[in-house]
Amino acid sequence: MSNGPVPRPHVLITGGAGFIGSHLAEACLAAGHRVTAIDDLSTGSRHNVEQLMADPLFRLVEDTIADPSTLGPLVEACDTVVHLAAAVGVDLIVHDPVRVIECNVIGTQAVLKAAVQHGRKVLVASSSEVYGKGAGAPFGEDDDRLLGPTTKSRWCYSTSKAAGEYLALAYHRQQGLPVVVMRFFNTVGPRQTGRYGMVVPRLVAQALAGEPLTVYGDGRQSRCFCDVNDVVRAILALATCPAAVGQVVNVGSTEEVTILELARRILALLGGDGATDAGGLLARGLIRLVPFESAYESGFEDMLRRVPDIRKITLLTGWTPGLPLDETLRRVVTWLAPARLIPGRPAEVG
Ligand code: NAD
């Protein structure tokens, strides 16, 4: 008796032409999977997946996740959905909160409903923003959340991502939908655009343009930046981990760096100014401190620290982040440097 060929796993990536989505699509194809990406190209771009277009196992559907007549058949045709589509970026959050709420809550509900209807597993991207402005570090998945008032649009992103988590967990509990909630901390790498307020590509683009690096606040706020390739490895590990179903899982690096130090390291990479400390770079005008209020909205609040507790994902899957920040920064510089010469590429941020 012939068993016939084993069918390829088919992954549907919402937001598949975005930063993380395009890297995930590449990794899935490299693993021999079929990949369908649905993306409305609002913050993503065809350019991110251009190198995949000739692959017969890849398909990009340029559409919104909000239309069930498009989404339903795509979900039905796949084995697993990785739901990354979202309205993201501090600029967007502050200036277009309606879009943020509609996309992240109603869009996520549309994905979950289609998954319930067709019995498909869903990995839902959430964010460390759900922890809000709590000062505790590192953040564990069951820690309390501390948010500002609803009159500050700053907090609508956090709330919209938390609503997505609630929806995913509720569909799991009430309808048995297999879900995994992935709480990403800051993720960086090539193809991330600085247009919507992401700090690493924005600072690298400024450094490449020979402009002062603008650091908001006093620059002492710290973050942990995880390389996108590590995040993609985490997604793939969680997708095949039965014990992760129904769980909320932090995904991030534990290498903590202040934004001032980040700016110093970027300048050191590009200009050989590594020996100069951040204070010296400030004094020489190579780094400029800008109050949050002038960049965003009055009363804008930022978190002092944002460090993940990653014991849960390590216990579940064995995953730990691998690439050090300096290597990731080098890759971002390599990606953005030639892009500066091509009009329309993401490097015209600044
Ligand atoms: P991104 O903006 O590059 O990706 C989001 C993608 O979703 C974009 O390609 C965009 O065009 C698409 N999209 C938005 N609305 C859509 C809609 N209605 N229909 C179809 N497509 C739509 O951002 P990213 O950094 O790749 O983020 C991916 C996911 O990871 C998001 O859910 C985000 O909240 C989460 N996340 C990212 C980070 C990070 O540091 N990059 C941190 C925490 C959480």
Image (spheres, rainbow, N blue to C red):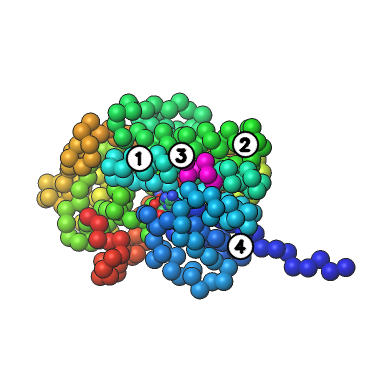
Lower position in the chain sequence, tag 3 or tag 4:
4
Cα separation between marks 1 and 4? 36 Å
Lower position in the chain sequence, tag 4 or tag 2:
4
Frontmost residue, 300 versus 199: 300
Residue shown at 66% from the left, 37% from the top: 176
Residue shown at 60% from the left, 49% from the top: 239
Cα separation between marks 3 and 4? 29 Å
The region drawn magenta spans 105-111
Residue indicated by mark 2? 172
Residue indicated by mark 4? 33
- Element at label 2: helix
Asked if the beta carbon under badge 2 is closer than 8 A to the nearest atom of ligand 1, the reply is no
Q: Residue furthest left?
A: 284
Lower position in the chain sequence, tag 3 or tag 1:
1
Cα separation between marks 3 and 1? 11 Å
Q: Amino acid at mark 2?
A: His
Asked if the beta carbon under badge 1 is closer than 8 A to the nearest atom of ligand 1, the reply is no
Q: Is residue 12 magenta?
A: no
Cα separation between marks 2 and 1? 27 Å
Residue indicated by mark 1? 98
What's the mark number on residue 105?
3
The total number of labels drawn is 4
- Element at label 3: helix
152 lies left or right of 116 = left
| Tag nearer the camera, 1 or 4 | 1
Please provide percent x and percent y for residue 77. 63, 57
Circles 3, 1 touching at the beta carbon (< 8 Å):
no
| Tag nearer the camera, 3 or 4 | 3
Q: Quadrant of the C terminus?
A: bottom left
